[in-house]
Amino acid sequence: MTITSRSEAETRAAARQLAADLRPDDVVLLSGDLGAGKTAFVKGLAEGLGVPPEDVSSPTFALIQEHRGGRLTLYHIDLYRLEPREVGDLGLEEIVSSGGVVAIEWPDRWLDPPSDSVRVDLRATVEDEREITIARK
Ligand SMILES: Nc1ncnc2c1ncn2[C@@H]1O[C@H](COP(=O)(O)OP(=O)(O)OP(=O)(O)O)[C@@H](O)[C@H]1O
Ligand SMILES: [Mg+2]
């Protein structure tokens, strides 16, 4: 499914819709360039899961942020600064089997993500427009 978003609010709305269908241990891989809207999309997932979206930020020091209090716990992971060999030491397999929803930015650093992950690709087209492709397992 591909949609065109014309604002951050529209991107968040698309993510809220996806969140409604998410189940325990689901993994959402978010690809796209710097500033494409991956973190904005995670804020929408938070809204949809009932987690305060203002708690979601771009993880600077914390690679993994855990947000409780919603329908499902949301784990927000940003692998931007990691090399693939470092990702292996994070224990992501454990996190994705803990019953929450796991949203991962820069998932290309993770060489063997679960094959049944939801894949979200965000691509900037013009100004505030983003083409968002969501591929479900
Ligand atoms: N249609 C849109 N969808 C999402 N964000 C948009 C859109 N139009 C403009 N923006 C702006 O683009 C920026 C997206 O920033 P965001 O932090 O979500 O990107 P990111 O993909 O997480 O980047 P990074 O790789 O640096 O983590 C925000 O400032 C947001 O307001
Ligand atoms: Mg980000």
Image (cartoon, rainbow, N blue to C red):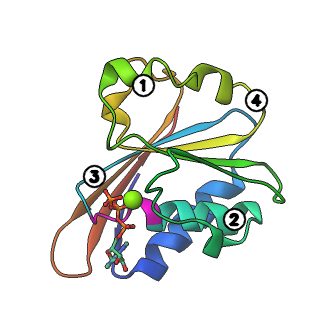
| Residue 79 percent coordinates (x, y) | 39, 40
Vertical placement of residue 18 versus 82, above or below: below
Question: Residue placed at 73% from the left, 60% from the top?
Answer: 49
Q: Residues within 10 Å of mark 4 (few under 14, many from 20)?
A: few
In reply to whether residue 30 is colored magenta, the answer given is no
Q: Which residue is under mark 1?
A: 87
Label 3 CB-ligand 1 distance < 8 A: yes
| Residue 42 percent coordinates (x, y) | 53, 60
Q: Secondary structure at mark 1?
A: helix
Q: Amino acid at mark 1?
A: Val
Mark yes or no: residue 96 visible. no
Specify start and end residues of the magenta stretch as a single range: 35-39
Q: CA distance from mark 2 to mark 4?
A: 19 Å
Q: Earlier in the sequence, mark 3 or mark 2?
A: 3
Q: Which residue is under mark 2?
A: 48
Q: Are marks 4 and 3 in contact (CB under 8 Å)?
A: no
